Image (tube, helix red, strand yellow):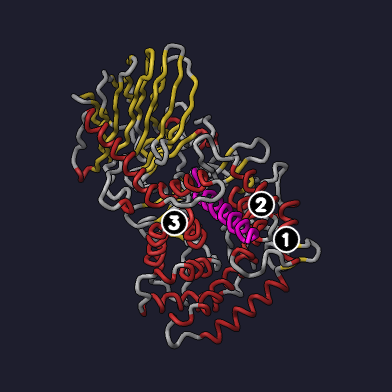
Amino acid sequence: MSETSIGDYALLSDRHSAALVSRDGSVDWLCCPRFDSPSVFGALLDRRAGHWSIRPTGPYTVSRRYIEPTMVLETRFETPTGVVVLTDAMAVSSTDDPHRLGADAPDLLIRSLRCEWGAVEVDLEFSPRPEYGLVVPLMSVVDGGVQIHGGTEMLALSAPVELTVEQDVVLARWTLQAEESVALAVHRSSLAGGRPRHWTQDEIAASLADTIESWCAWSGLHQNYEGPWSDLVHHSGRVLQALSYQPTGAIVAAATTSLPEEIGGERNWDYRFAWIRDASFTMEALWVAACPDEAHEFFEFMLAAAASYRPQDSLQIMYGIGGERDLTERQLEHLSGWRRSRPVRIGNGAWQQTQIDVYGELLGAAYRYQEHLPGMGPELSRFLAALADGALSRWQQPDNGIWEIRGEPRHFTYSKLMCWVALARAVDMADVMPPDAPLGKWTDARDEIRAAILRDGWSDSAGAFTQSFGSDALDASVLMMPVVGFLPADDPRMDRTITAIAERLTDNRGLVYRYLTVEGVDGLAGEEGTFLLCTFWLAQAQALAGRLDEARTTFERAAAYANDVGLLAEEVDPATGELLGNFPQAFSHIGLVNAAWAITEREQRDRM
């Protein structure tokens, strides 16, 4: 069982898969060859599920950083006898086109050690456990390192130091003198790909240099935001790039599964998939923190994944990163979970839920990106019209909502809002819709939904727009009303809603809950932390309302929960301030970018 805090990890990525490295130099999570593949190192969820640690033998202090402007990690260990620097990266190769970062990923995890001064004794412990810890592989020491074979995985550990295998663990201890360096790597191959080779010291060093150069080239080409908090915005753009699956352009919601929303609780989900809901928010964030090319790739993936949709069907809300549809959820009973938070789940049962907000998110993204859509031919026009027809036919139905509740479906205000967005954007794109598009019906339904939200989504007793029709419960998702243009943020009802959420849906630190679990809406036991995304939403809404001092305070309050290398989880424990939930969380970084941009835009507007 891992006692390491979620916030103690740093992310490595080759835009195909991801690894998490702890502050003390242990790779406790690695899934390959894809983000959603079974783990090779899974100590994050159970110590028995494998890890790869490199650290000084004796006492040390740690500091770390990403080499700017990359996702290559440096961990600096200071000991009484000397200083050693560990550089970690998942290898990518440079191409003639920096847009294609990660197109050539050799399934190589690099760990390079250099002694800055003195002499430092170092311990290595290498314990791969494929298939989420179910497989204890065969390991044999050979020239150049160790060969590993277990299940469907074949690995090669390349290391120029003396290695031994004891009780299915590779061990090594050696001393680095000043100016000495050692490069290590683990290379993966499938059974069909043949036995992986060992890499030489020069090859590993060259691959590391190439990886740094490739990230620098991408950042130099893409990152042009110059407003407030530019360092945070640029870094969030790189995190979103690191969470994107290069072969398709999909962006995973997070790199992990089953990191809990409550320590010891059951709110543990697999986030290594791509949600339609993220589309419009991601598009906006990528325009600010990266470039239109990344937004274009993500939107094309979403269109391709959902392209066979028909209005008589329910639109699927999420897909595998390769476009897969069946994401059947199951539990891994052999894993104890992070700090005994069970069950550990893979797959996500929400793929079968009805969530009618997704029509608006996809059409909203199409509207924002319509000038760049590939030709806007008849097939795409018919698809977008089918989405509008889906919203038209379903907006009056209850659903599971944005938060994917596992309780009884309800008439969630946010779901109705996004159906309004779907029809409003479809009408606004009338000139690219099919000639027989029912524009009159779309317009009438758009206006009917607006009236229903203003009538049934507002609660006089709550003094705010609420979670569902006829309810008094607050929900942070209604903060999206001014963002999507449903109401101005300074409308008296919206202004009162912003105030109500800031005062009554926050913890004692001022961080925002999605909703209050005591209402019982989600059908799950236990509680959860405050949501960083929702706190950034509040900052964004406050900025749109012209409440800039409040917006800046709210933004900085949320951004302060980034860990020492600038990564955000999904939630914050209201009692301890510890990060909770899957990590790093794309939506939290998206919220940061969009809130920073909203504050920047409002400040510029007020100066005019």
Q: Residues within 10 Å of mark 1 (few under 14, many from 20)?
A: many
**Mark 2 or mark 1, whichever is nearer to me:** 2
Residue 594 is inside the magenta segment: yes
Mark 2 or mark 3, which is nearer the start of the sequence?
3
Q: Quadrant of residue 70?
A: top left
Q: Residue at x 50, y 31 (%)?
A: 2
Mark 3 or 2, which is nearer the eye? 2
| Residue 561 percent across, percent down from the top left | 59, 40
Q: Going by the image, does 415 lie left or right of 157? A: right
Mark earlier in primary sequence (2, 1): 1
Residue 28 lies, in percent from the top left, at: 42, 33
Quadrant including the C terminus: bottom right
Which residues make up the magenta segment?
A: 584-608
Q: Are discs 3 and 2 less than 8 Å apart at CB?
A: no
Note whether 269 is above or below 29 in the view shown: below
What element does badge 1 sit on? helix
Q: Disc 2 designates what residue?
A: 551
**Residue at 55% in and 66% down:** 357
CA separation in Å, label 1 and label 3: 30 Å
> How far apart are the alpha carbons under marks 2 and 1?
15 Å
Residue type pointed to by label 1:
Thr
Asked if residue 539 is positioned above or below residue 574 in the image, the reply reads: below
Instruction: Name the residue type under label 3.
Output: Ala
Q: Amino acid at mark 2?
A: Ala
Question: What residue did someone put label 1 on?
Answer: 497
**Mark 2 closeness class: few <14, some 14–19, many ≥20 residues within 10 Å:** many
Report helix, strand or loop for mark 2. helix
276 drawn magenta:
no
**In terms of depth relative to the viewer, which is nearer, 342 or 61?**
61
Q: Say if 504 sits above or below 300 in the image.
A: above
